[in-house]
């Protein structure tokens, strides 16, 4: 079981879900859709212990979701 962190970041006028130290996984117009997608990916089988980190538009961390 791999522990991963999924980041919701604002980039190029879009909200994106990104793997920690990795690639972009998905792109969304709305932040709420990006957060929902990050939570879904973190809950997938084989990703136990994963977390979601949500950032603000300016790049500062807004919140951590440990058990999505």
Image: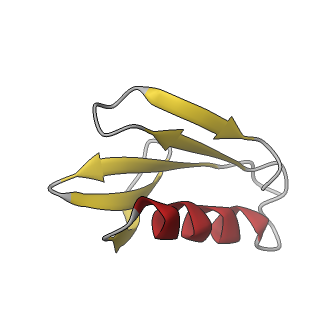
In percent of width and height, residue 54 lies at 52, 43
In the depicted structure, whether residue 62 falls above or below residue 52: above
Residue 55 sits in quarter = top left
In percent of width and height, residue 48 lies at 84, 57
Q: Please give left or right for residue 35 compared with residue 40 in the image.
A: left
Residue located at (52% from left, 32% from top): 62
Residue furthest to the top: 60
In the depicted structure, whether residue 40 falls above or below residue 58: below
In the depicted structure, whether residue 29 falls above or below residue 21: below
Q: Quadrant of the C terminus?
A: bottom right
Residue located at (78% from left, 42% from top): 66
Q: Quadrant of the N terminus?
A: bottom right
How many numbered marks are there?
Answer: 0
In the depicted structure, whether residue 17 falls above or below residue 4: below
Viewer-side residue, 49 vs 36: 36
In percent of width and height, residue 22 lies at 42, 50
Residue located at (74% from left, 50% from top): 50
Residue located at (15% from left, 55% from top): 12
Q: Please give left or right for residue 38 compared with residue 11 in the image.
A: right
In percent of width and height, residue 4 lies at 66, 49
Residue furthest to the left: 12
Q: Please give left or right for residue 5 compared with residue 8 in the image.
A: right
The colour scheme of the drawn protein is secondary structure
């Amino acid at each position: 079981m791999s522990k991963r962190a999924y980041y919701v970041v604002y980039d190029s006028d879009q909200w994106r879900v990104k793997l920690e130290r990795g690639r972009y996984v998905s792109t969304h117009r709305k932040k709420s859709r990006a957060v929902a997608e990050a939570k879904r990916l973190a809950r997938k089988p084989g990703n136990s212990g994963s977390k979601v980190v949500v950032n603000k538009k300016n790049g500062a961390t807004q919140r951590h979701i440990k058990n999505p």
